Image: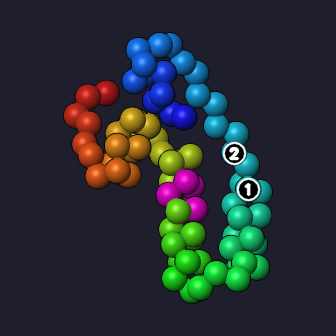
Amino acid sequence: EIGRAGRDGLPSTCVLFYSPADVHILKFLIEQGNGTPERKENDYRKLQNMIDFVHTKDCLRTFILGYFGEQYEGN
């Protein structure tokens, strides 16, 4: 729900709970799943996007918009 309050013009707080153990669990679940190789590759790509988001030192708004192919020139 990142950005929902901003779209509505209301103040908001966003909290992301993350642990490196989450990555290990998700990798295990991807490997144990019965998805096609293409599905697993897509799942790994999405997981890497989440990891990149968590560890970015850049503006989160810029990161999120970039994920959707948009650009933001502000801070």
Front in this rendered view, residue 74 or 12: 12
- Spot occupied by residue 28 in the image (x, y as percentages of width and height): 75, 72
SS at mark 2 in the image: loop
Relative horizontal placement of residue 35, taking residue 55 as reference (left or right): right
Which amino acid is tagged 1?
Asp
Relative horizontal placement of residue 32, taking residue 51 as reference (left or right): right
SS at mark 1 in the image: helix
Front in this rendered view, residue 2 or 53: 2
Front in this rendered view, residue 44 or 56: 44
Q: Is residue 24 above or below residue 18?
A: below
- Spot occupied by residue 63 in the image (x, y as percentages of width and height): 39, 44
Badge 1: how crowded within 10 Å, few (<14), some, or many (20+)? few
Q: Is residue 70 above or below residue 12?
A: below
Residue most toward the bottom?
A: 37
The reply to whether callout 2 and callout 1 are in contact (CB within 8 Å) is yes
- Specify the segment rendered in magenta: 47-51
Q: Residue 22, labelled with which disc?
A: 1
Q: Residue 18, labelled with which disc?
A: 2
| Residue at figure coordinates x 58%, y 28% from the top left | 14
Q: Quadrant of residue 64?
A: top left
